[in-house]
Amino acid sequence: MNAASDSVLISPAQLVELQATTPVVLIDTRDADTYAAGHIEGAVNLRETFTFLATSTPEGLQELKDTFAAHLGAIGLSGTETAVFYEDALNSGYGQSCRGYYLLTWLGYPHIKLLNGGFSAWKAAGLPVSTAVVTPVPATFPADLRMADVMLTKDDVAAVLGSDTVLLDVRDVDEWIGDSSSPYGRDFAPRKGRLPGAKWIEWYRFMKPTALGPMFKSPDEVRAECASQGIAPSDQVYLYCFKGARASNTFLALKQAGFTDVRMYFGSWNEWSRDPALPIESGLPTPAARKPVELALAA
């Protein structure tokens, strides 16, 4: 499968090729009305990919695992199929398709792809759109997968405050400076601010416009964005946003760019802000010294 086999990200043409040669479960993460108005033929709608809120307690993570094992089995993932996630456009759904990629990565699923550019890229390529109702064939999601070490709890994050671990906040600017607590409203969460010592790169900066809509930047460009904030591919990077969607977009961008130790605090600001015992920074951030980094550009 050439490039489609080598990267999580696949183009519309590569998706067509993949569907012709491999069992695929195509997962549309948009809301039900948008899905009904037109989707890629054969795609099933799983909005919970984006909407499910999780906490990082043992009970919360077990609920997250159980919930998605049930959902993913119900839409036909048994371990042999390739899961392909998409949304409308990579910059318009707050990272929802990438959240699916991250969750399946955490669960240890072996075959995961993401449509680069989303449904907008599919339509721009002149490929067919369907409004037909899709009835998935249920399967049993595999219970014996080896889960990946990419999930952080709030205790994990609290333990590295003040250390060399990079805490990378990728939320929108109004959340970073403390004007708003979330994308759902200024006062949706009880506190505004950021994790103490966090660095900030707004998640949009890992994408760029193309003729087919927004696409991920190249690995060299992603490394350059991180270098602007003193972050190197060899650093231990802990990502967060509000609920693990936009940070999933960045998680994928960094993994594709060769960052070797990237994990995510999936509970993110939604969880952290609700515990008054946890420290936050608020107000405009003060300038921080940047350490020099090597971009480690590909030869």
Image (tube, rainbow, N blue to C red):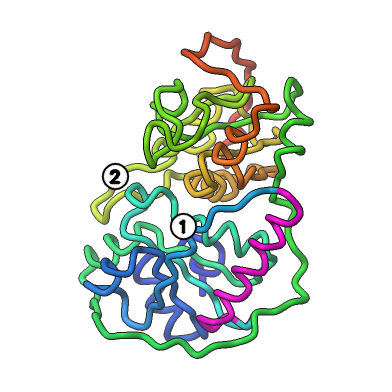
Specify whether residue 254 is in view.
Answer: yes
- From this view, report whether residue 160 is shown above or below residue 126: above
Give the overall secondary structure of the magenta segment: helix
Choose between 208 and 144: the one closer to the eye.
144
Q: Residues within 10 Å of mark 1 (few under 14, many from 20)?
A: some
Residue 56 location in percent, x, y? 69, 48
The residue that appears at 62% across and 83% down in the rendered structure is 78
Residue 283 location in percent, x, y? 48, 14
Residue 90 location in percent, x, y? 37, 52
**Residue 24 lies within the magenta run:** no
Residue 154, numbered label: none
Label 2 residue SS: loop
Residue 209, numbered label: 2
Quarter location, residue 183? top left
Would residue 123 be found to the left or right of residue 257 on screen?
Answer: left
Contact between marks 2 and 1 (CB within 8 A): the answer is no
- From this view, report whether residue 12 is shown above or below residue 55: below
Choose between 124 and 79: the one closer to the eye.
79
The magenta region covers 57-77
Q: Amino acid at mark 1?
A: Thr
Residue 51, numbered label: 1
If the image is split into quadrants, where does the C terminus sit? top right
